[in-house]
Amino acid sequence: MTTKNLLVELFVEELPPKALKKLGDAFAEGIFRGLEERDFLCSESESTVFASPRRLAVHITAVRSVSQPRPRAPVTLMPASVGLADGKPTPALLKRIQTKLYHPDVDIDWVMRERIFTAEENGKQVLKHREDLATGGTLEVGLEGALDEALHKLPIPKVMSYQLEKDCEFPGWSSVSFVRPAHGLVALHGSDVVHIEALGLKAGNSTHGHRFEAAVDPVVLKDADNYAVTLKKDGAVIASFAERKAEIAKQLATAAAKVGGGVKAIDDDALLDEVTALVERPNVLVCEFEKEFLDVPQECLILTMKANQKYFPLLEASGKLSNKFLVVSNISPLDASAVIQGNERVVRPRLADAKFFFDQDRKKTLASRVEGLGKVVYHNKLGSQGNRIKRVRAIAEAIANRIDPGRVADVQRAAELAKTDLVTDMVGEFPELQGIMGRYYALNDGLSVDVADAIEDHYKPRFAGDGLPRNTVGVIVALADKLETLVGMFGIGNLPTGDKDPFALRRHALGVIRMLVEKDLPLGLVELVAGAQPVFGEKIQDASAALVDFIYDRLSGSLREQGYSAQEVDAVLALRPQRLGDVAKRLAAVRAFAALPEAPALAAANKRISNILKKADGVDAHVSELLLQEPAEKALHAAMKQVAPQASARFDAGDYAASLQALAALREPVDAFFEGVMVNAEQADLRLNRLGLLATLHQAMNRVADLSKLAS
């Protein structure tokens, strides 16, 4: 059967830029998988994705014009004992054949010979029916079904409805729902049009290029393989998202080099993706603004240029913002001066607004804004931001007294002012600058660098991979801020559900974990959570236990993402270590222990001991040597007297690996004990003594981790 390459393109109005890449990938994947499931593809078939502001397309190699016939799975009819009697079909089987499978006059002997066979299923003999090969379907039918499925599965941010104007039952009244109005459909199998329909459109072999710079319109495609080349030559469009993105990146670098002075365009992949989704034929131009605007904090200028205008600010080698920026235009006129001047004229009012906000905000101190936080609602059950900042300050003060009493005053000041920039004009206009502007205004007010840094850093870490606060004051305030959120939200029952987490509690929990681990803070998790509870008074219920479980769950997931096995993580976290800075050392010790030849046997024995002790509640870890009778229990007790102190001393010294490795010497006496000693002896004092011996062993073996979790 011959194959040809396939092209499918949907031509639409401008697609949402932030969703374009996902839409393009999903469109291509959906059609490819749909054709694959319908047996139109070969093992060597490959797909190429195309996505531009006004089109979604896919090119697929080696596509059959008729699907490959395939056998249908045999159908189980009934147990053989029901369907056969002395090798002949019973009335039950005959009825099934003549009413469900074939017509009443069918040749029963032929059916029994060619279609019915016996097979084993779940240990029983059953009768199965082998059906004919499925017939191959045409590409028109298969592609239309695959395209329809792909369109319905697209990750569309928001659907819109519009009216069809032609080729429909009621022009102007018949409506279609899609992400944007669709105006054209191309489906080419080689050079042949595949006659399919979708969204009220009939497939053809022509599309449209650039709105202003296409050489011809419409752009006629000779075959599937010349799509990208023809669209670029005749339509002035780079159809490939990846190629367009690479071209923009190359032009940005070239333009920055021409500016000179070692400047580089800001590195922002999300912005690059968004701009790639806005232009069909990129043309990078250099613009500039007045140097007086550089007196404004560069974060403000960068944000307004990126977020509002989609420009690429140019940074000097030192990281300082220059007064030049790059624009990615969608047109390439011979004289670009009007485009450059237009963009410079557009950005100027934005920068002027930022300068005005900055100048106005500095007329009031942060301290004078504290009272204004009382008018900002945080949560209807938890009060205002003013109430909240008092709680954060109390929690931070308690933590500071534990880990750095000399910084209590700075911690109190930073916590009190941490949220005050929320009531400034700049943050009101650009919420993304919260904390950042607080730092600038704190320095303007004459506060110390540590306090100013803490005001900015108390939001950290804000996302995966973000840095931690740069000084101790910032760490304490950030920890207090996240604890206040977690304890408060858990206390009112406002918990994350599924993919919904409006107060970012998962992120806050991971932030707490990272600070406790990476800063190796001498704070116990349970004690930390419990200490934050009283600051809420009667506003919340005590949900400390649930919150601690939640944090350990986040820690477990984080450790597995870092490459630790489920067994290793479960073994360490089963003991609920309070100082999270110890967790990495415990995991390393468990991994080293698991590599020892004695580890499997000791882990299995530990699991057995755990099960025995669970059934014998209230056993004291106490052993009377007078009640030791069997040689094996005496040997185990003697070995423990020697090994347990060594393991304990190494544990107390923080050498967890050595502590676990010392336990390897117990393998032989433990094995001998279970082989030669009856734990549940009839004599009560012997039984309790042996259980006490096992309890003592269990305690010694499980100080670093629950070794029973390592048993397979």
Image (cartoon, rainbow, N blue to C red):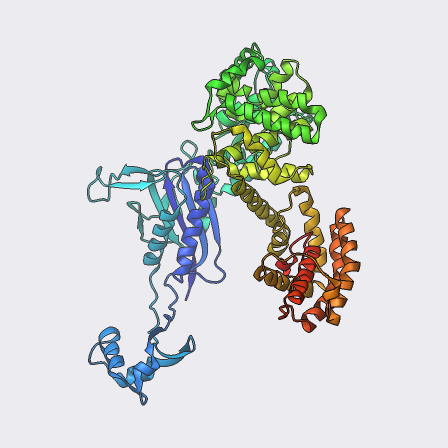
Q: Quadrant of residue 680?
A: bottom right
User: Which of the image's four quarters has the N terminus?
Assistant: bottom left
Establish if 77 lies above or below 589. below
Q: Quadrant of residue 401?
A: top right
* Number of marks in picture: 0
Res. 324 visible in picture:
no
Establish if 113 lies above or below 521. below
Q: Is residue 152 left or right of residue 392?
A: left
Establish if 55 lies above or below 609. above
Establish if 111 lies above or below 340. below
Res. 55 visible in picture:
yes
Residue 138, image x, y percentages? 33, 61
Residue 492, image x, y percentages? 46, 34
Q: Is residue 52 left or right of residue 608?
A: left
Residue 588, image x, y percentages? 70, 51
Q: Residue at coordinates 54% horizontally, 15% vertically from top-left?
A: 369
Q: Residue furthest top?
A: 363
Residue 674, image x, y percentages? 67, 70
Q: Is residue 673 left or right of residue 229?
A: right
Asked whether 58 or 428 is in front, the reply is 428
